Image (cartoon, rainbow, N blue to C red):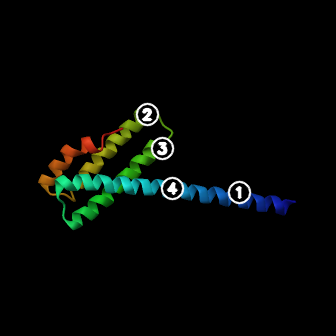
Amino acid sequence: MKKFMFLLFLAISQLILVQETYSQDDSGNKIEKLAKDLVRKYQSQLVMNKDQLRLFEEKVTEFLSRAEKIRNLDIPDSEKTHMLSLLHEQETAEMDGILTRPQLKRYQRMKPLLQPIE
């Protein structure tokens, strides 16, 4: 009986683990798709070269993922908004290392429209 319960426990825990992994993959796919859509919109105005485009997309994906983690935290909305605001500023600061000055200025004008803080 103990062996049966142990095997049942293992089977259930494996199902839960697989389901969590699937959910994370699904969330990751949504974030990557959203990042690609955003990058395409930015690219129409920023006209980045191939290297900039790759780095920009990686950075957008990273920050979308981090923002999603903040939104999923069990904390008051005011704290989430504050954390998202800081993250928003950090993302803009890190784009300074990828974009030229004129591109960065255009990015800063576009960002509130394309990526409002929620």
| Residue 24 numbered mark, or none | 4
| Residue 12 numbered mark, or none | 1
Q: Residues within 10 Å of mark 4 (few under 14, many from 20)?
A: few
Q: Which SS class for mark 2? A: helix
Q: Looking at the image, is mark 2 or mark 1 earlier in the sequence?
A: 1
Q: Which SS class for mark 1? A: helix
Q: Looking at the image, is mark 4 or mark 2 earlier in the sequence?
A: 4
Q: Are marks 4 and 3 in contact (CB under 8 Å)?
A: no
Relative placement, left or right, of 97 versus 80 is: left
Residue 33's quadrant in the figure?
bottom left
Quadrant that contains the N terminus? bottom right
Relative placement, left or right, of 75 versus 36 is: right
The residue that label 2 is drawn on is 77
Q: Residues within 10 Å of mark 1 (few under 14, many from 20)?
A: few
- Looking at numbered disc 2 in the image, what kind of residue is underneath it? Asp
Q: Is residue 32 above or below residue 92?
A: below
Number of the front mark, 4 or 3? 4
Q: Which SS class for mark 4? A: helix
Residue at the location (49% across, 58% down)?
25
Q: CA distance from mark 2 to mark 3?
A: 11 Å
Relative placement, left or right, of 116 versus 97 is: right
- Looking at numbered disc 4 in the image, what kind of residue is underneath it? Gln
Q: CA distance from mark 4 to mark 2?
A: 23 Å
The residue that label 3 is drawn on is 72
Residue at the location (15% across, 48% down)?
105
Q: Is residue 7 above or below residue 92?
A: below
